[in-house]
Amino acid sequence: MGQVPVLVTGGAGYIGSHAVLALQDAGWPVAVIDNLTTGFRFAIPDGVPLYEGDIEDGALLARIFAEQKIGAVMHFAGSIIVPESVENPLKYYHNNTAKSRALIAAAVEAGVKHFIFSSTAATYGIPEVSPVTEDSPKSPINPYGMSKLMTETMLADTARAHPLNYCALRYFNVAGADPEARTGQSTAGATHLIKVAVEAALGKRSHVGVFGTDFDTPDGTGVRDYIHVSDLAAAHVLALEALIAEPQRSLTMNCGYGQGFSVLEVLDAVDRVTNRKIERKLEGRRAGDPDSLISDNRRIKATLPWVPKYADLDVIVSHALAWERKLTEIRGDA
């Protein structure tokens, strides 16, 4: 199977930078476009071309597609903070929907044949049944989820009208870091639980807030499906191979392990791995948080030869912790 050059949008960000490593490790030619508003130049490996710019810039995209002979796009660029999307919906419809439309249009214009989209379980809203299948009702409860669902719809319509196939991967809770500590979650003020917890374990935060203790779960705290970011990145490479192998077929698949852990179970794992006790502050639940959100991952397991390597909560935590320590060195902060 031919390895076409791949453009990774948002390749200096958390998940995008892991996808760049996964592609590079597997021998694919890679280029990155990132405006570096939330991404980091240090997250991009040496030798990978970085175009600093915006995916809305059609002239820049046309130049990249031509210079790099791009045959596929992996699209991670976008805004991801759910509460911010509620406060500033137009930012999300601009960054996630309008800019994705510009990117898809440029890809079609350049004759790019394959498109992999970073979607989200937020497209399901608050599911009535968990685990959630891909065919569960799509009823996002915030502009973040809706902005991603609109992009999925644009891709489906575009694939019917043009010689382009796509894969939308709906992520559950992405966590951890590259096992070799080459990249990781670097965003200051991140809201991901495992990131917050390892920061607290290293003294970068005074405590971890536990939002809601009255959920309909075994210990009363929210249950989520945590997937290691490197397993997620590996799924993207396999999805690209599947798109190239069957150009008439597009795919939509959940990305998760099909098992859940509660907030308290995650914090217990961080305590175990660090051999210290994080201070926990019990607070009221946040609007729109489902009791449990777990993926039904049978479709991706049946469609791709995807075998997760890091489906162990303590391993996810240990990789996140190792990256957090390295990040302290990179930044020179305490």
Image (spheres, rainbow, N blue to C red):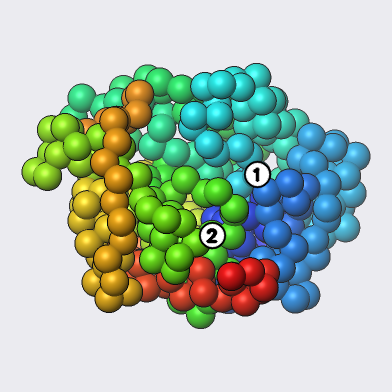
Q: Nearer the viewer, residue 251 or 146?
A: 146
x and y percentages locating residue 155 in the rendered image: 58, 31
Q: CA distance from mark 2 to mark 1?
A: 15 Å
State whether residue 292 is above or below residue 126: below
Residue 66 location, x and y as percent?
86, 52
Q: Which residue is mark 2?
A: 185
Residue at the limit of the structure toward the left, as seen here: 218
* The C terminus lies in quadrant: bottom right
In the depicted structure, whether residue 231 falls above or below residue 295: below
Q: Is residue 281 visible?
A: yes
The quarter of the image holding the N terminus is bottom right
Q: Residue at x 44, y 38 (%)?
A: 120
Q: Earlier in the sequence, mark 2 or mark 1?
A: 1
What residue is at 16 percent from the left and 32 percent from the top?
214
Which label lies toward us, 2 or 1?
2
Q: Residue at x 74, y 57 (%)?
A: 32
Helix, strand or loop for disc 1: loop
Q: Quadrant of residue 163?
A: top right
| Image x and y of residue 211, in percent | 30, 37
Q: Is residue 160 in view from this perspective?
A: no
Q: Are marks 2 and 1 in contact (CB under 8 Å)?
A: no
Farthest-out residue, bottom: 180
The correct choice, above or below, for 310 with respect to 300 in the image is below
Q: Position of residue 267 (x, y in %)?
A: 27, 58
Residue in view at x 60 percent, y 47 percent: 76
- Type of amino acid under label 1: Ala
Along the line of sight, the residue nearer the viewer: 137 or 95: 95
Q: Is residue 250 left or right of residue 300?
A: right
Q: Amino acid at mark 2?
A: Gln
Q: Which mark is residue 77?
A: 1
